Amino acid sequence: MSEHRDPGDCQGVAALVVYRCACGRVWADAPSPLCDPIGDDPRFESIETLECSMRLYHCLQREGIRTVGQLTQRSARELLKIKNFGRGTLREVIALLADKGLALRPDPHSDASVLRGLTAVTG
């Protein structure tokens, strides 16, 4: 027997899921697969799941970056403006995201010069 859902209930559940994801809290006890849009998408993972240095973790925490998705919304130039966030930390972020098949937000006005210096060192 299939469960009947009132459309208003689904809207409320969907709003709650979106709110919790935006706040970096994954809703682990979703009542049904219909209400669990997260799945295996790495963008919804907490930055705590990244195996990163403490420097990177603390820099992201201070900036209010709680999920991998929030991190991918930043450009290299934006990250380099964070206190104690240097080129080495940027290389770490790029590598961690690449392992998940993700990348930073492109910034056509600045990333070419910033990333050029990184690839000369790493590649």
Image (tube, grey):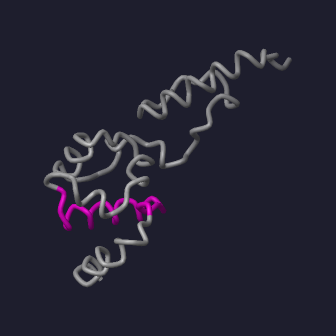
Q: Residue 54 in the image: x percent, y percent?
A: 17, 48
Determine the residue positioned at 62% across, 32% down.
36
Among the 4 quarters of the image, the one containing residue 110: bottom left
Instruction: Tally the marks.
Output: 0
Q: Residue 81 in the image: x percent, y percent?
A: 22, 57
Determine the residue positioned at 41% across, 65% down.
98
Q: Residue 47 in the image: x percent, y percent?
A: 34, 44
Q: Residue 48 in the image: x percent, y percent?
A: 31, 41
Extreme residue in the left direction: 84
Q: Which residues are magenta?
A: 85-105
Q: Is residue 50 left or right of residue 86?
A: right
Extreme residue in the front direction: 109
- Residue 104 in magenta stretch: yes
Q: Main secondary structure of the magenta part?
A: helix
Viewport quadrant of the C terminus: bottom left
Q: Is residue 9 left or right of residue 82?
A: right
